Image (tube, helix red, strand yellow):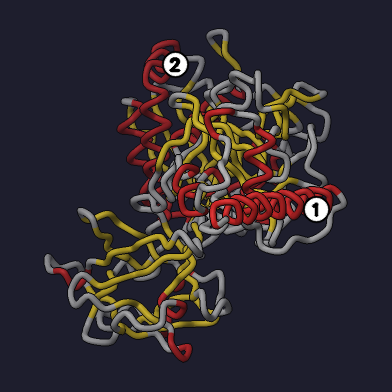
Amino acid sequence: MADRLGRFLIGGFAMMLTLIACCCMCAEGAGVAYAAPDAAALLAGEAQEGNASTELSAQETQAQRIARMAVVKDGLYHLTSVAKPAYGVAVSGDSVKAGARVGVFADSEASWAQKWILVQDKVSGYYTVRNLGSRLFLTVAGKAREGSKVKQAKHAQTLRQLWRPYVKGEKIQLRSAAVPELALRVVRTQGNKLELRLGVAKGAARTSRFWFSQTEALQDGMSYFIRSNAYPSKNLALKGASLASGAKIVLGRRANAKSQKFRLVKAGKSYRIQSDKSCKYLKAFTRSIVQSELAAGKAEKWRVSLDLGTGAFEIKSTRNGRFVDATGGKLALRPKANAKKRLFVLTPTYGFTVFLDAGHGKNASGWGVYDPGAEGNGRSEADLTRDLTARIASALKGSDIRVFNGSDYSVPYWQRNAKARSLGCDLVLSIHFDSDGSATTASMVGPNGAAGSRAFNAIIHPRLVASTGLRDGGTMNRGDITVVNGSVPSVLLEVCFIDDARSLRTYLSRRDDVAASLAEGIVEASRCADIPR
């Protein structure tokens, strides 16, 4: 009698779960908000897959189902398309806004838009997939069906925000909990564009497969805003923007200020946290944090750990084991007490922005006018400037320098400094090649140029000379060139004379080194206190 009663109860419970799951699936199709997904949703999903090796039995416990679905460790991942190995899953435009499209874009492990936090839901067994940069969740846009797009959205109780990693060898599918027969797939749309949409999981050998590689959240040398998770209107800040050793680090009202930008520099398993404003380092005392010159001890070392549940970070002193804490809106070092108050949101600042101006070319002397610039030895200045700016931009990838390539804007030459200002740039580097001269390389600044131009030139000019291997032609003052006489600190480089065959050959054999050296100079300038921002 007891056995018959047990079988009846088990069968009835399974049927009840199935009915609840079917109701949930109907509601999802109608776009209705969900209650928290539970074992019923899991049961429905497993049953629809039709995979005999993974079918649920009525006797299987919820814990056993969750354990079986845990095919990926909770962690931070970079997702690369198997069909398009040079493309990764990313938020379009690095957007932090809800509703932004998620697709496949040129691979860049340094970009936070391509870093995803996978955490298994301990109720349903499915996973949430959360973007590190925006802290928003990968979500099916609208009704879940074949062809549906995906976006990022705030957390919601919906199956459209839950995913099951399905392992095939070293490759993984992400199947939707809303319709388990559908998985993320790379598709080619009209206009030959690559997009990420839901598609039938079975039979999609490559387009629905991704490599999941664990990745680091923080990049050595990158500059960040450090915002309190408990008090979103406040950032870590250098009190009074002071440059003095001993100045306190406090919570200040959020602003796009250099005194609120901090660079994380790797030191073994820890980090040193350096002020972009003073170039000094955060130092731990018993309860307070100050800035100081670099020393060899543990006081300037910090453990910075990603909290997978929130996408925020804990910052812990290696000197005394205390956490940076914002309790009461006051910054202090405290023991592990209030978890919410010791979490901080890190945002890459793109601490410095440069406008790379490719001299001459499209629209250079007026709208609709193409200006080739100087010509010699079968080369035109416009082609060489565009090539070198592209190489410099490539060399700056992975740094915290934000780059605007002027050749993409093609505004007339007299408007380029003003264009850089409208884009919020900190520097303009204008690239040129001359003719009718000698085997030299030179730079130009403007007598009416912005403060910081000469400091920038003092950094970039020696690197130009050393990398080209040409004779130093010095620095000229030119009041007649608008690009170096505007409101943004600017330097113009005459890289070489293209009608001198030997000079041109020397440059062409070294142009990658020239680009790398100039990129290093821009990075150095970004940390120079003499260049105002």
Q: Which residue is identified by label 2? A: 504
Q: Can residue 345 be seen in this view?
A: yes
Judge the density around disc 1: few (<14), some (14-19), many (≥20) Cα neighbours within 10 Å.
few
Question: In this rendering, would 274 be left or right of 173?
Answer: left
Point out residue 417 in the picture as x, y percentages from the top left corner.
64, 50
Point out residue 415 in the picture as x, y percentages from the top left corner.
72, 47
Towards the viewer: 298 or 28:
28
Instruction: Name the mark nearer the viewer: 1 or 2.
Output: 1
Q: What residue type is labelled 1?
A: Cys
The CA span between labels 1 and 2 is: 73 Å
Q: Disc 1 on helix, strand or loop? A: helix
Q: Can residue 41 be seen in this view?
A: no
Name of the residue lying farthest toward the left: 296
Taking the spot 72% from the left edge, 34% from the top edge, the residue there is 197
Q: Quadrant of residue 250?
A: bottom left
Question: In this rendering, would 493 be left or right of 45?
Answer: left
Q: What residue type is labelled 2?
A: Leu
